[in-house]
Image (cartoon, grey):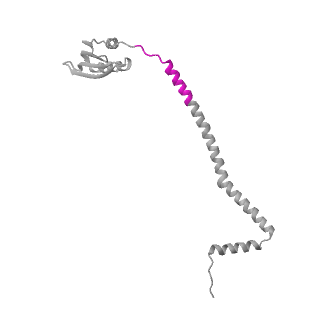
Amino acid sequence: MATTLRPATETRLIQWRQWWQLRSPAERSILLVAGGVVLGLVAWVLVWQPLTRDTERLERRLVEQRASVAIARRQADEIAALARNTVEPTPRDARADVELALARQGLKASAIERGDDQRLRVTLDGVSFDVLATLLDGLQRDARLSVVDLTAAARVEPGQVRAEMTFALPR
């Protein structure tokens, strides 16, 4: 006699059907309700809770981002207003600025020459190196004159140099 082996899943399915058939209709109803409640709880924990948590988080981020956009728009409006209200500085005479800075330091230039349109060459015959540094700093800060070339040659007196400077004029 030949016997056939059934797969394990088919055997379990048959056993489950037999078990189910042995239950009374009241037991079946209770088991279905309990299964529905368990399924509902699992869906609530695994689906509904994460959805509500993410929704709340996204609503908070939306409020924060709307506030950031409002701040950015207000700042953009302020920048635009500043750009409209900016007064162009009147062109200054670089030579006059240099002469004023020299006078403040108690110096006199041996030569101030205008090179091309964007350069000014200044020569000082005898100046203390410390005073020269202060002069250059003041011209950079106050008159916006940048040194593009500087030659300082030592003199016989200690701490004294002969300085030849070329400034780039502001635009």
Secondary structure mostly seen in the magenta stretch: helix
Residue 4 lies in quadrant: bottom right
Against 120, residue 57 (above or below) is below
**Image position, residue 146 (x, y; %):** 33, 21
Tell me residue 143's x, y (percent): 37, 17
Residue at the far bottom: name it: 1
Residue nearest the viewer, comparing 95 with 152: 95
The correct choice, above or below, for 151 with respect to 45 in the image is above
Figure quadrant of residue 133? top left
**Looking at the image, which residue is at 68% across and 58% down?**
42
On screen, residue 78 above or below 25: above
Q: Nearer the viewer, residue 148 or 108?
A: 148
Q: In this rendering, is residue 110 above or below 21?
A: above
| In this picture, residue 18 sits left or right of residue 67 | right
Image coordinates for residue 68, horizontal then vertical, percent: 57, 34
Counting every numbered tag in the picture gives 0
Left or right, 70 with respect to 129, comes to right
Percent x, y for residue 130? 29, 21
- Looking at the image, residue 156 sits to the left or right of residue 104; the answer is left
Q: Quadrant of the C terminus?
A: top left
Toward the viewer: 127 or 64? 64
- At 64% from the left edge and 50% from the top edge, which residue is drawn? 50
Residue at figure coordinates x 77%, y 67% from the top left: 28
Q: Is residue 87 magenta?
A: yes
Span of residues in magenta: 72-90
On whether residue 162 falls in the magenta region, the answer is: no
In the orientation shown, which residue stands out farthest toward the front?
Answer: 2
